[in-house]
Image (cartoon, rainbow, N blue to C red):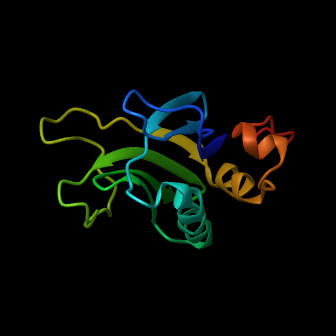
Amino acid sequence: MFAIRLLTPNRLGADGERLGEIVVGEFREGFVCHLAGAVSNLEASWRPELAALVRGAPVAILQHDPRVAWLVYREGRECFVQQRLSLDGTFGGLVPRVVTNEDGDAVSTWVTSLAAVQWFLDAEPGSPDAEQGAAPNPAGI
């Protein structure tokens, strides 16, 4: 399963910022969205990144803050999701996927299928399934 979305405008963070949510398999995480003037367009900016991933791009950058993004790496039919901080906000040098940090510890990574990302993209915007962000999939994806 895969989904990423903005939560409704009445669900705000402690400082009044918009919140988002990502779902990767059993993993579900809320996050704060801080892109001045662009928060309402975040979902629209994420979709082309994910579509390019499905078409063969090695990584999709799902930015939700000037310095923070969810990265979705495609490796064959699997996708690996990581959250990344970029102090300068450029998100360069993303390939190959980092699996350990500078201390040798494993980088937190969640795995889903490319089919799950495609299913997310194919979901009709505005449908109850899309609004829930993680509807059951009869194909078991």
The image position of residue 59, as x and y in percent, is 44, 63
The image position of residue 75, as x and y in percent, is 50, 58
Give the mark count.
0
Name the quadrant of the C terminus.
top right
Q: Residue at x 54, y 29 (%)?
A: 27
The image position of residue 26, as x and y in percent, is 60, 27
* The quarter of the displayed image where residue 128 is located: top right
The image position of residue 45, as x and y in percent, is 53, 65
Name the quadrant of the N terminus.
top right
Q: Residue at x 77, y 55 (%)?
A: 125
Q: Residue at x 61, y 72 (%)?
A: 55
Q: Is residue 111 left or right of residue 90?
A: right
Q: Is residue 4 left or right of residue 124?
A: left
Q: Is residue 92 left or right of residue 27?
A: left
Q: Residue at x 56, y 31 (%)?
A: 11
Residue 12 sits above or below residue 66 on the image: above
* The quarter of the displayed image where residue 118 is located: bottom right
Residue 94 sits above or below residue 71 on the image: below
Instruction: In this rendered view, identify the residue nearer to me: 95 or 120.
Output: 120
Q: Which residue lies most toward the right here?
A: 138
Q: Is residue 17 left or right of residue 106?
A: right
